[in-house]
Image (tube, helix red, strand yellow):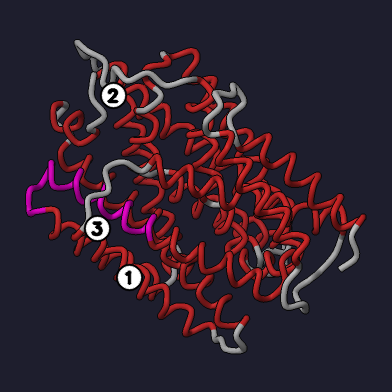
Amino acid sequence: MNEKAKRSNLFGHGLLWFGAGVSIAEILTGTYLAPLGWEAGMTAIVLGHLIGGVLFFLTGLVSARSGKSAMEAVKMAYGRYGGAFFAMLNVLQLVGWTGIMIYDGALSATAIWPIGNWGWCVVIGALIVLWIMVGVRNFGRMNTITMTALFILTVIMCIVIMEETGTAPFSSEMISFGAALELSVSMPLSWLPVVGDYTKDTEEPVRAALVSTLVYGLVSSWMFLIGMGAAILAGTGDIAQIMLRAGLGTVGLLIIVFSTVTTAFLDAFSAGISAEAVRTAMGQGGEEKGKKLAVFAATIGTVAAILFPMDDITGLLYMIGSVFAPMVAVLLGAFFVLKTDAQNKACDWRNIFAWLVGFLIYRLLMDVDLPIGYTLPTVLITFALSVGLNKCVKA
């Protein structure tokens, strides 16, 4: 690959993860940090994204160096059926995320152009399916133009919010610094079972993983800051209402629709890839089938967004953290320290046991107010346990 092609590839990674980071869900999560105030809230955002960003980078690097999708790489640590188990959990969380993104986008879009929540769910869902069928990279210049416009519109939204002055805080419910930190960690954490799907084909593993991490981490932190700023300065977490008051109805609508599509596309597309990882574990598979499964995931997410209320996502964020943080800790130990590959085995019980201990530790720590959150201690303990078990216990 020549230098121009390499730069283009890295630019494509940046565009992809910029689109993932610009998300209404991340803005809404940022509003939860408002009771901490500016200084503590910004500290929680930065530290949380640093912790999540390190895991994001290392996970993306595993796939970039191995050439395997996220869930295929997981098989190297857990075996075929162990990997299939996590792939099934990933499909569930990605379909859930697709539904949440569509629901949040439709709710905000309806406030600007009231055609009904279900109507906007259908519109956004249809655009996601189009993105999947054509393929985001095949949009070429259109994708570049879309992301550039989204960047400009988001800057306008940020300026409008920072000029707002509210009379009361958005939320009087207090949140501890540790809980706020964990919410900031949870967003990059939710992409851990996904990032490898988009770094696996690169010829520059470190640069591709680094570009993806930096772009997503910076944009996600920006979205959190917008949400927190809206709650502190405007006294509301309703971004659509803020933009309407500022006379940015059409601009706001474009931000909402395009940011929802570019983020939910990754969720639905990776749901198809993860479903395909389950099929290959059972001796079936095929790339075209994976795309059809992605369309199916987007359809299910759209239907779920129409039928079910999805206003509070904190429970889902914590569940994702408790499942995938220890999962990745074991994978990193197997790939970078032990340099083992269990994909030809049915199952590696040592690593599954280490993951289960990590899962329980995370859930137990949720009842303890730790200033460093739950992810960091869970990852460190699970990593050490999995490496120790593999060195001390023969398979």
* Whether label 3 touches label 2, CB < 8 Å: no
Q: Which mark is residue 305?
A: 3
* Whether label 1 touches label 2, CB < 8 Å: no
- Amino acid carrying label 3: it is Ala
Crowd rating for badge 2 (residues with CA inside 10 Å; few <14, some 14–19, many 20+): many
- The residue shown at (7%, 54%) is 115
What is the CA distance from the residue labelled 1 to the residue labelled 2? 32 Å
Q: Determine the secondary structure under disc 1.
A: helix
- Amino acid carrying label 1: it is Val
* Foreground residue among 165 and 204: 165
* Foreground residue among 127 and 347: 347
Disc 3 vs disc 2: which is toward the camera? 3
For the N terminus, the quadrant is: bottom right
Check disc 1 and report the residue beneath it: 129
Disc 3 vs disc 1: which is toward the camera? 3
Sequence order check, earlier mark of 3 and 1: 1
Check disc 2 and report the residue beneath it: 161
Which segment did they paint magenta?
A: 96-116
Position of 110 with respect to 37 (left or right) is left
Does residue 194 lie above or below 154 as drawn? Answer: below
- Spot occupied by residue 148 in the image (x, y as percentages of width and height): 40, 46
